Amino acid sequence: MNILSVQCIRVLRKNVLRVHGLLTTALEIVKRLTDFSGTTYRGDDMGSVEDFFEGEPVGFLLARASQYMRLQLGRSFADAGLGISVEQWRLLIELWQRDGLNQRELGERCFKSKVSVTKMLAKLEDQGYVLRRRSTRDRRGNRVFLTAAGKRLRDVTLELAAKNNMHAVDGVDDDDLAAFKRVARTIFLNME
């Protein structure tokens, strides 16, 4: 692993958890979950659609933050001439961690359907980033391997993602960010 890779990994580790801080801090999200009467939306007493969105439900805020971050990261990939989507990048991340996964495993790890994974891999293969080979263990399935070009994408994309993450949390206080992460993790675990 070269120096650039180590530096990128350090920057990414430091900033990757900041992804969820784009729109607001954890304290602001908790405040925004409360409607005008001081009660928290729980799903059974939402009232009108207008009331629901005025209370800015946490799912809406998290989804919106995620959408904006994916959009910006996709633009960064396009500006760099990489020719990959954020969804394709997600598959590559899994392969950088464990090259040779089968398509089913990739889909499970990325929460994607078999059809979606097949289409994304076809595009990545056309671009020369991955190769699909019949599995020796299960002839019905393909194992997916990174090419040299696919391996080279790692450092470039991780650097772009780290910059995107830093931009997203610009101006967010470290304590607020830590509180937000705790709340976001709890929400994630509640929804598992």
Image (cartoon, rainbow, N blue to C red):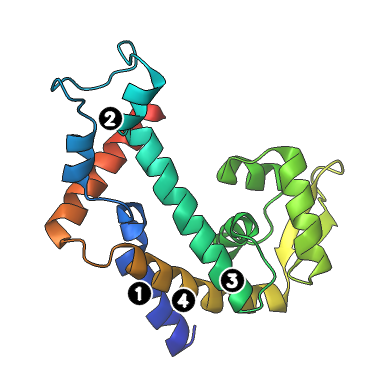
For label 3, the SS is helix
Kindly identify which residue carries mark 1.
11
Locate residue 180 relative to residue 167 in the image: left or right.
left
Identify which residue, 15 or 60, lies in the foreground.
60
| Circle 3 Cα neighbour tier, 10 Å, few/some/many (<14 / 14–19 / ≥20) | many
The amino acid type found where label 1 is placed reads Val
Which circle's residue, 3 or 1, is located before the other in the chain? 1
Q: Which residue is mark 2?
A: 55
The residue under label 4 is 159
Label 3: which residue? 77
Give the mark nearest the N terminus, 3 or 4: 3
- On the image, the x and y values in percent for residue 159 come to 46, 76
On the image, which quarter does residue 144 sit in?
bottom right
The single residue placed furthest to the bottom in the displayed view is 3
Label 2 or label 3, whichever comes before in sequence order: 2
**Residue type, numbered disc 2:** Gly
